[in-house]
Amino acid sequence: MTGIHTTVKVVGAKCNYDCKYCFYLEKDLLLNSKKVMNLDVLESYIKNYISNQETPIIEFAWHGGEPLLAGLNFFNKAIELQKKYAGNKVIKNTLQTNGSRLDKEWCRLFKENNFLIGLSFDGPEFLQAAYRTKQGKSVFNESLNALKLLQKMNVDYNVLACVTQEYCQHAEDIYTFFKKHKVKHLQFSPIIEFLPSEQELYRGQHFASNIILTTSSNTDVRQSMPWSVNAKDYGHFLVDIFKLWIKHDVGKVYISNFEQALTQYIGNESPNCIHAKECGSSYSIESNGDVYFCDHVTYPESHLGNITTDTLQQLAENSSKFDFSKQSRLSNRCKQCRYLRICNGGCPKHRYLTSNFEYENVLCEGYLYFFQQIEKYLHAMTSLLANGYPASYIMQALDGPLILTPQTKGN
């Protein structure tokens, strides 16, 4: 098989933070997923995952909850097992953490084994403190200290920042903060959650299910949680960040939201699943080995099997019973949109069923505004790249005519 990706919840939903907007904390009740993955399941997963992939590079993505709660010995064993089963394949590891358990020993492990660390960090304290908490207290200092330690220990990292409604009003403060702290790789992730139905509340959900799996009979837009970002403000936030970035930081600061748009504008496949043409190649694996379609739709209804008893091929066959085809569920408006190739309707989690029985994305208006505002820059950077010039030359063009000669290529 090729193209299968897994996100491993090594401690299930267990976390030492209690962030208000976290969509995964409820899984401890829905899936009883708080236990640390045992070593037998770990070995079955690693062996199965490597042996069923035809690609020369195998990427492991360790998530939670908070994966570092599994402990150093767990990850040392994981690395040992990867080496045991790798053969001639190259192993890459990514890990998403809140940074609370990071110390020099963890950083040495990550550095020596070429881990890419994703640090969950929203930026300025006045924005982060309201939602990212531990026992009701701000975790800002822990997050900032984790960032500084990763930098000091030369560990490869990026920052994942969650975009709430309030967050959208402070684009300049946010961008200035991350530049001040020398963050070079950044991703902004919109927070969109809806109030659950009575049936969903009854079974322990804090938020509504994905519309495809929902137990609610309401087909229109459901009431969103107070911190959920709305489309218009999210679009303006992305544009505000883009305008700050395009002036001085192209080729210096890498923002995945912009990298994705440029990559797809050029004609390549999306580097992330949100704007990819299709879903279905990224499975979520719980600590007991249970496999689900995606971590955004990890509910009992989307259970595919278990990594200790089913091959990836069998799991893929089981997933075919879920109609998660992004293309078949595109609305007529999406199909006719000039930005379809760089949007593809966004994440199915953010779609709702209209009274006309078409699936619309709640962020559509924001995506449309964002793509409209940056299209001329995407076109210019595409032309630069096609002619052998760095995309960063776009910054010079903002100040006046850009004179390109053979001598300037690659400089």
Image (cartoon, grey):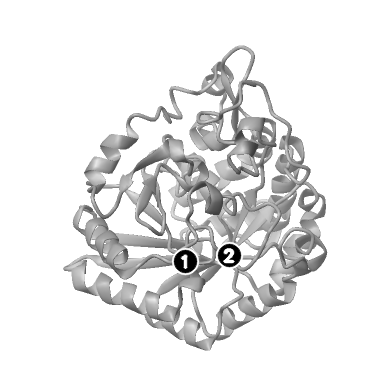
Closest to the observer, 368 or 290: 290
Left or right: residue 148 versus residue 305 is: right
* Vertical placement of residue 167 versus 141, above or below: above
284 or 164, nearer to the observer? 284
Residue 19 lies left or right of residue 309; in this view the side is: right
Q: Kindly identify the residue that appears in the image at 46 percent across and 69 percent down.
A: 116
Q: In what element is the residue under mark 2?
A: loop
Q: Position of residue 319 (x, y in %)?
A: 34, 36
Q: Which mark is residue 95?
A: 1
Q: Position of residue 321 (x, y in %)?
A: 34, 29
Find residue 385 and report its horizontal and vertical position in percent: 47, 51
The residue positioned 31% from the left and 65% from the top of the image is: 42
Where is 410 relative to 239, above or below?
below
Q: Position of residue 403 (x, y in %)?
A: 59, 54
Q: Amino acid at mark 1?
A: Leu
The quadrant in which residue 65 appears is bottom right
Is residue 153 depicted above or below 342 in this figure? Answer: below
Q: Residue at x 55, y 30 (%)?
A: 214
Task: Name the amino acid, label 2.
Answer: Cys
The residue depicted at 43 percent of the width and 63 percent of the height is 10
- Left or right: 236 in relation to 368: right
Whether residue 206 is visible to the viewer of this picture, yes or no, is: yes
Q: Residues within 10 Å of mark 2 (few under 14, many from 20)?
A: many
Q: Would residue 197 be seen by someone viewing this image from the given angle?
A: no
Q: Which structural element holds mark 1?
A: strand
Q: Which residue is mark 2?
A: 15
Q: Residues within 10 Å of mark 1 (few under 14, many from 20)?
A: many
